[in-house]
Each structure stands twice: as structure tokens, then as C-alpha cells.
Image (cartoon, rainbow, N blue to C red):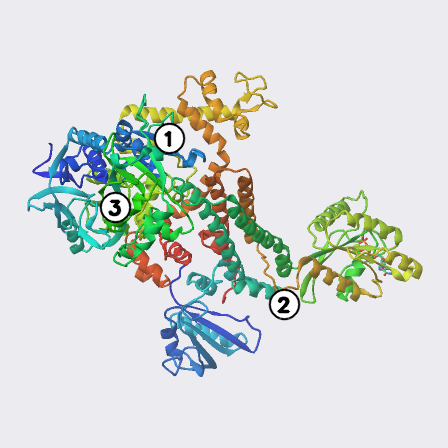
Amino acid sequence: MYSLEGTIAALSTPEGVGGIAVVRLSGPESCSIIRPCLSRKDLEPNRAHFMPFLHPKSGDLIDETVITYFKAPHSYTGEDLIEISCHGGRIVPGLILNCLYIAGARPALPGEFTRRAFINGKMDLTQAEAVADMIHAQTEAGLQSARTLLRGRLSKELMHIRQLLTESAALLEVGLDFSDQDIETISHKDVEKRVLAGLKQISSLISSYKTGRILHEGARVPIVGRPNAGKSSLLNAVLHEERVITSDIPGTTRDYIEERINHGGVLIRLFDTAGLRETEDILETAGLKKTHELMSSADLLLMVTVNKEETEHALYLLKQQDKPSIIALNKTDLLSQHEIRSCRSLSTPEIPIIPICAIHESNIGELMETVLKTLQKTYALNTESLAISHLRHQNHLLSARNALLTAQKALNNNLSPEFIIHDIREAISSLDDITGKTTSMDILNHIFDQFCVGK
Amino acid sequence: MKQQNGIYDIIVVGGGHAGVEAALAAARLGKSTALITLSIQSIARMSCNPSIGGLAKGHLVRELDVLGGEMGKAIDKTGIQFKMLNRSKGRAVWSPRAQADKRAYSNYMQQIILGSPNLDIIEGEGFCISIQSYRVTGLYLKDGSLIRGEKIILTNGTFLNGLIHIGPVQIGSGRYGELPSTGISNSLKTMGFCVKRLKTGTPSRITRRSINFSKMTPLYGDPEPEPFSFSTQLFNPKDIPCYLTHTTEQTHEIIKNALHRSPLYSGEIHGTGPRYCPSIEDKIVRFSDKPTHQIFLEPEWEGSEQWYINGFSSSLPVDIQIKALRAISGLERAEIIKPGYAIEYDYFPSYQLHHSLESKDVSGLYFAGQINGTSGYEEAAVQGFVAAVNAVRSLNEQEPIILKRSHAYIGVLIDDLITKETDEPYRMFTSLAEYRLILRSDNADHRLCEISRQIGIQSQEMTDLFFRSRDEKHDIRNYFNNETLHKDNALNIDIPASQKYSQAIKKQILSENHMPDLHQKIFQNYLFHSLDQAFIETLYEGYIHRQEIMINKMASLEDQAIPDTLNYDTIKSLSNEGREKLKRFRPETLGQASRIRGVSPSDIQILLIYMK
Ligand SMILES: Nc1nc2c(ncn2[C@@H]2O[C@H](COP(=O)(O)OP(=O)(O)OP(=O)(O)O)[C@@H](O)[C@H]2O)c(=O)[nH]1
Ligand SMILES: [Mg+2]
């Protein structure tokens, strides 16, 4: 089981890459453990010391290093923490870690540094989660969003909502507990105002979930269309390589294939899918089922057409969806200028139509630019605004919202205050679940399990 | 008296509301008990307001009644006006309140005490506690005599080291006209107990003949009054009115101009006063835009000459009190019998106690009532009862009875006392009970019958009745859930379509008003109370269920015991404030630890990890 005892050490930069590696040592014994490894006896806090690192027993030189000492509680973990910057590669960091183990440190468990930081009150749960997000971030935008969380923006926002709700409950309590005194009783209006404000903020956090999820996990963009439309060819064109098989036999693609590209700082997950048509073929039917699943979980639909009739049909289909969509009019090399122009004239701001030629990789740039712009506009990906990205947060926010909606209904129905207060208290408790005020051990373990060693 | 070799099983110090319940409970559980009181006449005296119950306090009385206490029966027998408060709100916050006849009430209690087997009354004043190796051995009285006993329950909290303020005048005192008791307080201090000061106030009393009732509104009780005690039958109490009047702008002028003569504002008083029972000068300063405040005139007993002015507690000089009173409509000729005053007194913060109310440091020593910083007769009574039950159980080598916050207001009260620091007298409020929708005053019997049986004071007859009613309620709820209320029903209720009874109740088609009819036509063999409870639980099923989910959510923390041997100094990562508070409060469970102010969520996580 997890223990907070002892002083821990681990490599905190990726193993084997980079010219410089950083080994971290944290815990109450940090200073005494590192002492036999250094020629100098005492370290000044918050200063980089350039000095040789020695074997604690033999005194042999291991490496020339830079040692930085962060004194408790002013460190990442809140404990005495020492960072040893040494030469990279596989050998030297390993030797240094070994020396620290010999001198009394123990290997850190995954996420243990951050866990200690959380336990020592250096960060709350949402901030600890943000550290995990940063480790796993795949794009600049994802990193940026994690940084916002790490600064405690979410906790601050939640505190503000919590304050509103606590006030509403307190106002209502007066009407119950002092009804025998002539202290001014409060109108439901004052309460409702606060509940509504809380509800609004919670709802906007909830709707930011899509944004947060896209920033962290990427936007899901399936390429759909009739068989033989050139979906696979389009994917290859975007990737500039023959990633998937194409052929003039309709139904070439049976199972879907996913490819991720980092475009303009946003992770775009393209799915090549089985073409949409009626079929008897069992394999293809299965493929179609998957295509439909992909379409319903999509963040943006990219539909490939090859002529005016198909384009009109595509527009008809897409208008029934409430997802952002783009039509790629493919095989323009086979179309007359006139037909291309009359297709283009069907284009609307909601559903842009971009003519391309997949096999000649022409106009793919404009298409991908349009994909990016549409994603950014629909999901507010450009702003620095706060976005939640964890399903855990989303679920707690949803229960908080449900409780508040019940409260609002209860207010409207003039239910006795104790019921409304219960609703509000339930919402508060859900918010507290997010910041870790009332988190159980299992949830904590789950969160810290996402970390790797050294963080 | 079956007291062995001159040693009592239990000594109760103080004959107030805590002491009375403590002494009766101990004696009824068969223990030789001594009740030490200044005088027999002062037993169960109501030193302040002439009423029992009220918001949240009524819940306490009902719970105590189920467990086997006396307060509910006493007020049912002697009360002179009964009213259910908050009747316009939901059932959970309904609270019974009664206007008391102070004389009849304490007479009743004195008779019960005098007639109780196993119980000796000793007139005298406790002075010093005798202990040997951290265990009590007896009590020295002021006259030097020693009363030996196994357990001591201290309930002598009425204004320990009291200091009365009336304007600039200060008088060392106990209750008005009584000597201050300083002995016990000093004895505890020398033993190392932490002591703090609190402040409260009481209004002036005036003569009946000086009141012009014709200028005031009479207030009567409920036309169909409900008793406190589940055992009270054929309830037909008196209904003597109180009177309502209002302060005037002139009253406010007089008080504002004399504020500098109030010890509250001249800085003379250091104890913290209660926010919820503010003095009239407080109200005028804090609610300065209110042109007038309500004033209730209440008789102290039936036909009494002395009337209590509820809402006019004050520590202003007597001349100002008279002038301000006489500016109130109907009180133009008011004659004061006793002036209002503010009083500062000692109390012993309850973090020094276990939830059994036994001292954490001195074995066999229990604290109950105002000595723990509470105000109110009801708060005192329940503590006295719990302390005595646990003292007896300790003698019998049984586990203490600890009511949880999800069980009873009594549980909330004791847990709050122990885990929260108060700087004002603690008064029970419904808002303090997070599981309020479940802790209703009407279901105290169903909630607490198991625990009551475990305690063993309640009569067999009543215990059987509680269990019968609880079982009946279950039957009726099943009926509601499974049986259909048809379109042509015996109740002649017009319903849009046939549906389950439970649905009809939730849609409020079948309402409380239909219950008497339903009782007669379908459930005539059941107690009406059982039907009523089944109805409420069905109506509020959704909310009750959600509250139960909250209880379960907290249960993992509540049930996780912290070993008494845990040394917080060895847990390095605790916050400094958290460690200091944990060391001082020594919580018994993680749930308790989480309610201590200054113990942060991460401190709790650390304990969680540490105790794994
Ligand atoms: N002339 C021309 N042919 C193209 C273009 N794009 C694709 N094709 C051809 O169209 C045929 C089908 O292309 P695929 O990319 O396999 O089509 P698909 O939509 O993936 O088809 P399925 O996987 O069967 O649903 C191939 O022979 C491609 O070479 C284009 O822009 N111009
Ligand atoms: Mg294909």
C-alpha cells in the first residue's frame, strides 16, 4: 500500500533522450542522504551549485552535476527537494539514482512527487490532474489548457459557485430557524438569483467539456461518403503518404483506420471509414455499423462527394445532423469548371464545400484550413478560457446541475425551504468532489495511477 | 439505598435540567445515585424563559422522550399553551413548543425526583473533585464533607463564576439572586481543564398589574394541540394567552442615546454573546433600518404576577430599561420586578470530552449542560441523560451509546460540541442537522426505538408501541406501493385515472386531508400515527432517498475509527494548524476529524493514507 514515509528519488526527465537529465530527490531526509555524495557539506536553498557527484561509499566521481536545493515547504512537493542535473543518456542518471538508493532513498512510485504535493497542500485535486494532463499533452493547445488548470483556475471558479450556493442556503435557513423571531425573512427572489447564477456558471463549465476534451484528446473527424468517393485517397493526401489501400473497387475499406495529425496546434483524429451504402456483405455491414458509431461521436464530419447530385444529397443528410460538417468535393479533375462552380455555389457558412483532387493532392491545404477554422470556431479552441477535460469533473458538474435544477423547480413550486436547501447542499457536495474535499481513497488512487515515475 | 460501603455508583452535581435527567436515568437503570443540589426547591428551576421546546429544541424533547427522559412528560402535564411551530413549512421542521408554568413544572420534577427509588438528594454545594490516578473517587462539598462515588456527572453549569452586568454595575453571581459557584470551576482549572468565558442575557420581568393588555394582541395555542411525549394520551391542556406588542421609535431613541452606558458597547464585557438571541440594544444597532421590533409578553406561571418580556433582553442601566419599556405600547406604566442583565460565565470547551460525554483525561468524570457551553433547558436535558446512560454503561462494562448525526438531533448536538469550537452559547438549530429531512420530530419513535431498547429505561409498553407502529408503517408503505387506487374508490376522490396509492400521494392527489378517511376505511386496525408516517415517507420518498445517499457517502469517513494511540507528531506531512487541532480535539473517527475547523481536506487524505 501507499506510504508517505521515506525520501524518494527518480529520474524526472524522459529516459535515454536529451543531453541533460534531471534526477529528483524529495523527502525529509533529502539533505542527509545527498551529503555523502557531495564534496560540500551544506547546500544553500534556491541556488544552483555546480559540483562533482561522488559515490557515497567509495567517493569515486560519478559526474559533474548541477545541484539545486528547494527547502520545505517552498518546493514542488512541499518537502525538502533536491534536483540533480547530470549528463543524459542511459548510464549516468542510472548511476546517480543508484548512489541515492545506497545512501538511503527509495525509488519513487508513479506520480508520487505530485501525490506528495497534493497531500502537502501544494495543489488541489484539479491541479494534480492538470499535471497528469501536461505529461500526456499531445499538442500546444492541450498543454496550454492544462496550464490554466494548474494555475488553479477551475478551483477558483468552483469556489465562487460554492460561495453563491452557500449564501443561498444560508438565506433560506434564516426563514426556518428564526421564523419565531421578527428578523427580516428573505424573499425567494434573492435565493433564486444566486441559484440561477450558480447554475449558469456550472452550465458553461459543462459545455466547456467538449472544448477541454478536444484540446486534450483531439477532435474526432471521420471521413465519410459513398464507396469509391476517394475517402482513403483523401487520407493519404493529407498524410502525404500511401497510408491506406485505395482501389477502384467500391467497398475497399471495411474497417476504419485512425490517423492523428497535429494541425495548427490542434490534434485532429482522422478516421477513414467504410463507404455508406446498402449492402449484403457481412463484413461491410459490420464496417458500416462502425461508421455510424463514428459519425455519432464525431466532433466534425468530413463528407466526400464526387458530383453535384451526391453533393446535394450530402447537404440534405448533413443538415439533419447538428454537428459541424464540411463537404470535400473530390475528383475535380474529372469535373467541368461549370459543374465545380455550380457545386460551390451550394456552399454555406454552416456547410462549406471545398473542391479537391485527392490523387493530385490539390487544394488539400484549403480543406484542412477549413477543418481547423471550423473546429476552432465551434469549440472555442483558440481562447485561453477555462475548459474542463475530465469525465470525472463533467460527471460531478452534471450532478451539481441536476441538484440545482431540482432546487429551481422547488423554488418555483414554493416548496418548504428545507427541501431547497437539501438540493443546494447536494450541489455543493458534488462541487467538493471535484476539488477533492470529499474524495475517497479509491478515487485518489485512480487519479494518481495515471502518472509515470518521476512526476 | 443500595449504596455499597458508602460509595455511590453515580453522583450528579447540580439539579438543573441536565442534572434532573441524569439523576433519573441513572437511578432508573438501577444505580445508586446521589443528586447534589443547593436546595430541593431549586430542582428543575426554569431560570430564564418560561417555555419548553421551540424550533429544533422541540425535536430534542421528542427524542429524549423516546429514549426514556422525563422532560416531555413534565411539560405535557404542566404546560399552559401548546403550539406547533413552522406549521406552514414542511414536516421536517415542525417543532412543538409549549408555554410553561415554571412553578408547576419544577414542582412536578421535584415530586418525580423525590419519589424515585435509588436516588438520594443531598443539599449542598460541590466544591472539589477527588481523583486518584486520573479516576474520580468522590466529591468534596463546600462544608468539607466527602461523598464517595464511582462516577461524577457535572451539570452544575448555571453561570459558573458568573459576573452580572447591569449598566456599569457588576455583581458576582450565579442565577439572579443566587450566589456564584466558583468552587467546581477552580477545582477543574487546577486539574488542568481548559476553561473559557461565554456571555448571555436575560430580559427584565415586570408586574402583571402594570401591563395594559387591551393595547396588545393576545396569542393562543393550537386549537388541536399536540403533546411532546409519545406516551401522553387524552391531551387536554390549558390554553393561556401570551401577548404581542411592538417597540416604538421612541424606545429606539432612548436606547440609542444610552448605548455608551451599556457594558456591551463600553467594552466591559469580554465573553462572546449569542448572535441568535440578541439583546434589544444589539437588535437596534444591527437592524437599524427596522423601525420596530416584536415584543412578546409571557406569564411565568398561570396567574403569575411576574411576566417575562421575550425580546427585550438588555444590560442597560435600570433607569434606561424602565424608560425604554414605558415607550412600548401597552407598557406605559410598566413596573420592573427584576431588571434585564447580561451575564458572563465559565464553561469547559467540550473537545475535552469523548462523545460519551466522559472526560478524555479523567476517567469517570462526565460533563453535561451549560458547563459544556450550551444554552437552553432542552440542550441541557439531553446531555444529562446521555452522560448518565453512558456512566451507567461504563459501570456495567458496556460500550457507550453514541448517537450519530444521522440518528438524532442529540447526535448532532454532541458531535458539534466536541468537534466545533463555539464562541457563543450553543443552541440547537435545524440547520445544524445535515440530515434534517430524516430527523423529524414526528418520527423520533421510529428512528430511535432500537437505541431506546438498548438503553433500557423506556417502559415495555411504550417500547412495544414504538416497534408496532414502525412495523405497521412498513406494511402500509408496501400497501401504497402495490395496491391501486381505483377511479371509483371508497374515498370518493376524483382522480383522472386509476393508479398506485404511492403515485397518487406523490402527485398530491391523495393528500394529508384524506388520511383520516383512509384510516377509517382501510387502516382502521392500525395506529393513525403509522399511517401518517407512511404517508410522509411516501410523499417525500425522493428527498429522503437522496438524503440517505448523502449519509452513505459520508459513512466511509464516519465509520473509520482513528486509533487512540495515533501520534500526530510522527505524521510529518500534516499541516501545522491541522496537527495542532487534531492533537487538541483527538477525534475518534475520520468523520469527526473532517468537521474540525482548521483540519484541511488534505489533512484528512493524509490520515486516510496513514491509517491504511
Ligand atoms: N480521377 C481521380 N480519381 C480519384 C481521385 N481520388 C480517388 N480516386 C480514385 O477513386 C478510386 C477509389 O478511391 P478510394 O480512395 O479507394 O475510395 P474510397 O472512398 O476509400 O472507397 P471505399 O473504401 O471503397 O469506400 C481509386 O481508384 C482512386 O484512385 C481523384 O481526385 N481523381
Ligand atoms: Mg477506402
Dot 2 beta carbon under 8 Å from ligand 1: no
Q: Amino acid at mark 2?
A: Glu
> Disc 2 designates what residue?
A140
Which quadrant of the picture is home to ligand 1? bottom right
Res B257 quadrant in image: bottom left
Tell me how far mark 3 sits from mark 1, CA to CA.
Answer: 42 Å
Rate crowding at label 1 as few (under 14), some (14 to 19) or many (20 or more) other CA atoms within 10 Å.
some
Above or below for A446 versus A103 = above
Above or below for B345 versus B62 = below
Indicate left or right for B306 with A368 as reference. left
Where does the image place residue A215, in percent across and percent down from the top left? 63, 61
Question: From this viewpoint, is residue B284 visible?
Answer: yes
Which of the pair B135/B438 is nearer the observer? B438
Where does the image place residue A326, in percent across and percent down from the top left? 78, 56
> Disc 1 designates what residue?
B446
Which of the pair B135/A247 is nearer the observer? B135
The chain identifier of the residue carrying mark 2 reads: A
Rate crowding at label 2 as few (under 14), some (14 to 19) or many (20 or more) other CA atoms within 10 Å.
some
Rate crowding at label 3 as few (under 14), some (14 to 19) or many (20 or more) other CA atoms within 10 Å.
many
Tell me how far mark 2 sits from mark 1, CA to CA.
Answer: 61 Å
> Which residue occupies 11% across, 38% down?
B122
Between disc 3 and disc 1, the foreground one is 3
> Marks 3 and 1: CB-CB under 8 Å?
no
Do the residues at pointers 3 and 2 share their chain? Answer: no
Res A244 quadrant in image: bottom right
Where does the image place residue A123, in percent across and percent down from the top left? 47, 63
Disc on the earlier residue, 3 or 1: 3
